[in-house]
Image (tube, helix red, strand yellow):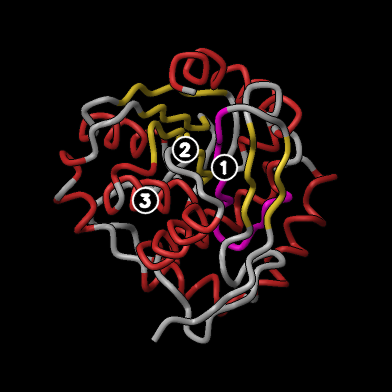
Amino acid sequence: GHQTLTLAYTQTGSGPPMLLLHGLGLSRKSWQKNLRFLEQRGTVYALDLPGFGQSEAPEQVWSTRQLAEVVFAFLRTLGLASVVAIGHSLGGEVCLWLAYLYPSCTKALILAATPGIAPAPAPWKRLLGLALDVFLEPPLFMPKLYAAYYQAGPYRVIRTLQKTDITPLLKNIQHIKLPVLLINGHLDPVVKVSEGRLWCQRLSGADTRVIQASHGLIFSQPEAFNQTCTDFLLKNL
């Protein structure tokens, strides 16, 4: 049956809609250094995915595909027809599912440090990467990250990784026909630059950029990240 979940989100700016989806274990707070830039270009909806941040947790742990189904329901509830979806890390995977399952609801994607290897590395390898990445992020930001992980709980983080299977996405990737900008961090130990290049080869409308950043590129190098999005947003919003 369908559960009714209460989702937390922030809405700011005005104009064409943008949807922001955070990474695994994080929350909508991870976008705080991008909001001022983005809200000058359109209306920004930064969502806490179910089970993360301040959004209600479902009874089971959901895969990225199931999270995309909820995000679609969220967009429908708000009456948003076609958004530019911007996803960080696992949030980028949710964006891809959204574009694949509901082609009419996204008009362009920005995927930041989005995992894309098939077959995916073992969850422990991703988690090891995340553990290493902690030392590459801005120290002032780390308490916020830890607080978010702690709130989501290690179990939810690990189970989400285990339940997520992007094989169907990769098999049907040619059906995603829309402009995509991939932004990867040169120093990212979690999602290597090569994964961005792989997505780029598979997605017909994709363009890839690499910035000098670690996995948390949206908040560790916000100026570089925002700058990299500028032209793409001008064209596609």
User: Which of labels 1 and 3 is toward the front?
Assistant: 3
Kind of residue indicated by mark 1? His
Q: Which residue is mark 1?
A: 215
Per the image, is 28 magenta? yes
Per the image, is 161 magenta? no
- In the rendered structure, find residue 98 and report the number of the disc placed on it: 3
- Could you say where residue 105 lies in the image, as x and y percent from the top left? 38, 44
Q: Residues under labels 1 and 3: Cα distance?
A: 22 Å
- Could you say where residue 93 lies in the image, as x and y percent from the top left? 40, 51
Are there few (<14), some (14-19), or many (20+) residues within 10 Å of tag 2? Answer: many
User: Measuring 31% from the left and 30% from the top, which residue is drawn there?
Assistant: 197
Boundaries of the magenta span: 16-29
Mark 2–mark 3 CB contact (< 8 Å): no
Which quarter of the rendered picture does the N terminus lie within? Answer: bottom left
Q: Residue furthest right?
A: 140
Kind of residue indicated by mark 3? Leu
Mark 1–mark 3 CB contact (< 8 Å): no
Q: Which residue is mark 2?
A: 83
Judge by depth and name the residue closer to the eye, 204 or 197.
204
User: Measuring 73% from the left and 50% from the top, which residue is drawn there?
Assistant: 29
